[in-house]
Amino acid sequence: MKKVIFGSVMFLAGLISAAVLLAGTMANDWTLNGSPSSFWNMSRYGLMPAFYIFVAVAVLGAVIAIWGLFDNAD
């Protein structure tokens, strides 16, 4: 049960962090070919490594949570 809770918290933290980063980069008025682009803004600010880390934390948290569901150690 501890793995499920820990994994769920990690997943939520990574998901919220990535969502805040995506939403924050859209606060600027920069556009790419006439349409706003969050990924272009993140690459311009050098935030793509942080975005990749947040997504990796979310994926790792989901894996730990799913692993905890099927673990029979408890």
Image: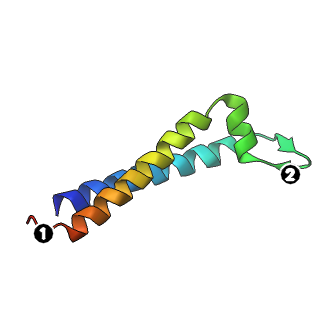
Helix or strand or loop: what does disc 1 sit on? Answer: loop
Q: CA distance from mark 1 to mark 2?
A: 50 Å
Residue at image position (56%, 41%) is 51
Would residue 27 be seen by someone viewing this image from the given angle? no
Which element carries disc 2, helix, strand or loop? strand
Expressed as whole percent of the image width and height from the top left, the position of residue 47 reads 61, 33
The colour scheme used here is rainbow
Query: Quarter holding the C terminus?
Result: bottom left
At x 43%, y 54%, the residue is 59
Q: Residue furthest left?
A: 74
Which numbered dot is residue 72?
1
**Looking at the picture, does residue 34 appear above or below residue 74?**
above
In the figure, is residue 65 to the left or right of 74?
Answer: right
The answer to whether residue 57 of the structure is visible from this angle is yes
29 with respect to 13 (left or right): right
User: Could you say where residue 69 lies in the image, as x and y percent from the top left?
Assistant: 24, 69
Side of 72 relative to 45 (left or right): left
Where residue 2 sits, quadrant-wise, is bottom left
Q: Quadrant of residue 65?
A: bottom left
Picture quarter with the N terminus: bottom left
Q: Nearer the viewer, mark 1 or mark 2?
A: 1
Q: Earlier in the sequence, mark 1 or mark 2?
A: 2
Mark 1 residue type:
Asn
Residue under pointer 2: 35
